[in-house]
Amino acid sequence: MPERQSTGQTPEPYEKVEEEMRRRAQQRVFEEEVEKWIKELREKARIVIAKAPPGLPNRTPTPLATRSP
């Protein structure tokens, strides 16, 4: 690890850090996928504010998320 090298310490043996490095790599891949999914959803999302039909009390419209065509 760079932190250990900068302080003059010897790096941990690979066997000791293998699982932690694997976990970090998997977490990073997962987070990248989540960011990609969120970006795609935002690009496809369209917010429409619906007005109350005639005859109903005038209320503040509720935002509705809809899919784009």
Image (tube, grey):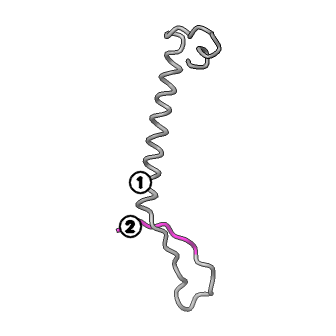
The part of the image, by quadrant, that contains residue 59 is bottom right
Nearer the observer, disc 2 or disc 1? Answer: 1
Please give the name of the residue rendered at 49% of the width and 66% of the height, measured from the top-left corner. 65
Highlighted range, magenta: 62-69
Please give the name of the residue rendered at 58% of the width and 77% of the height, measured from the top-left corner. 61
Give the amino acid type for the residue marked by disc 2 in the picture. Ser
Q: Which mark is residue 40?
A: 1
Q: Up-down: is 44 above or below 10?
A: below
Q: Residue furthest right?
A: 7
Q: Considering only order in the chain, which callout, 1 or 2, is on the residue closer to the N terminus?
A: 1
Q: Position of residue 30 (x, y in %)?
A: 46, 37
Label 2, label 1: how far apart the Cα atoms are: 12 Å
Q: Which mark is residue 68?
A: 2
Please give the name of the residue rendered at 47% of the width and 28% of the height, measured from the top-left corner. 25
Q: Confirm or deny contact between disc 2 and disc 1 (CB under 8 A).
A: no
The part of the image, by quadrant, that contains residue 10 is top right
Label 2: few (<14), some or many (≥20) within 10 Å? few
Q: Up-down: is 14 above or below 64?
A: above
Q: Residue furthest left?
A: 69
Give the amino acid type for the residue marked by disc 1 in the picture. Glu
Q: Position of residue 9 (x, y in %)?
A: 62, 9
Label 1: few (<14), some or many (≥20) within 10 Å? few
**Where's the C terminus, which quadrant?**
bottom left
Closest to the observer: 60 or 9?
Answer: 9
- SS of the residue at dot 2? loop
